[in-house]
Image (cartoon, rainbow, N blue to C red):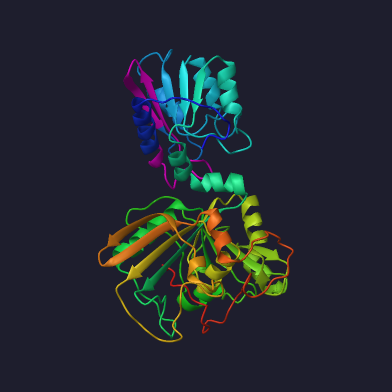
Amino acid sequence: MNKHNEQFTFTKEDRAYMERALELAARGRGATSPNPMVGALIVKRGRVIAEGWHRQAGAPHAEIEAIRSAQEPLEGATLYVTLEPCCHFGKTPPCTQEIIKHKFERVVVAARDPNPLVSGKGIEELRAAQIRVEVGLCELEARRQNEFFFTYHEKKRPFIISKWAMTLDGKIATETGHSRWITNEMSRAYAHELRAQVDAVMVGVGTVLMDNPLLTVRLEGYSGRQPLRIIVDGNLRIPSRAKCLTKASPGSVIICTSSASSRDKRHELEKAGHRVLVFPGRGLLDFHEVMAEFHKLGIQSILCEGGSSLTGALFEAQLVDKVVAFVAPKIVGGKNAKIPIAGWGVLHMDRALSLSDVSIRSFGSDVCIEGYIAPQEWSKTGTENHGDSSAELTPVTALKDLAPNSQNSTGGSNA
């Protein structure tokens, strides 16, 4: 996937070292945002002499961790690192200067950093110092590991995971809207692990009205950061007593609404410490505008937990990157029982979206299917995404918050 037409020959030992660096990087999952996960390995005379990984945002980068842990001189050594070393001052000094200072002979990089502050400049700086730099070993694996970070910088929007839990007959709730619980405790624990990895959890106001979820990570022994809570509520119907509001710290809730919503209600929510984002329209939100605003706020990843109207709007806008679907061996029936995706749909099976890189795992009797929607898949559906946030909106291409007894109002959030 090397877009710079650079050709390097890597050995099986090189690959083994980089795979180890990727394993180290994964230890920082959920703790490094807005930084990427990065792992580093130092090899000298065929021996691994130091390892490191980026443990959390603000902490030393992986290369520095590895350099500091080395017990012998590093001159002439090879550094394997999963992402291009930084060359700018942020919360920590640039890694390139430390690499140059210690006179590494060779640096092997899995992937270039998409951040405009780096984006090839780190590699150029090292090469200018006469260090041999080779790029592209395990690049696909490195990009997938940091899919949030790459999507945020390359597409200028958050990476979006659409998650739902449904019965064997495809329902996310009964005809009455009751949905607790479709899946078992093991599945729900994994859903909380997903929350712990993202910057934000997003639901529609219908889900808040029906399920009154907290939208927090509640894992035994968990002490990491809590994701932001995003509520999409075009007409500001969210009650001030909702758990996601009353049990939230100031600034941890973002409410997306339309300019037609009550100004008094907006002021009430803001006075309570919540952030209210107002978008043009009368209850309908253009999700390209919404995601552009999230990008400005530095939100790199979102777990969307429904309801079905919100999920359908994201599919209609072609903004879903990954799907995580839980299926429980239960049957509820009901002509009007709720389904995972409302509004959006294809008319012919040969236009159905196919997931790629699919993984299937079991949680007791439940099954979890995860997969990605490749960009080219959207062209099959027969709908075009022009990315024009000024286009006229319809209830299909944008979300209008629905009444709690509506077909599309709930989403089976993991509470």
Task: Give me the residue at 37% from left, 61% from top.
Answer: 369
Quadrant containing the C terminus is bottom left
Q: Position of residue 125 (x, y in %)?
A: 59, 22
Bounds of the magenta segment: 25-52
Magenta stretch: includes residue 182:
no
Task: Give me the residue at 46% from left, 64% from top.
Answer: 215
Q: Position of residue 179 (x, y in %)?
A: 40, 77
Asked if 243 appears above or below 160 in the picture, the reply is below
- The tally of labels here is 0
Front in this rendered view, residue 223 or 16:
16
Task: Give me the residue at 53% from left, 75% from top.
Answer: 342
Task: Classify residue 187 by image quadrant.
Answer: bottom left
Task: Give me the residue at 60% from left, 77% from top.
Answer: 237
Front in this rendered view, residue 198 or 81:
81
Please indicate whether residue 157 sits to the left or right of residue 388 in the image.
left
Residue 174 visible in the picture = yes
Q: Position of residue 52 (x, y in %)?
A: 39, 30
Residue 253 visible in the picture = no
Asked if 97 appears above or below 165 in the picture, the reply is above
Q: Position of residue 150 (x, y in %)?
A: 54, 44
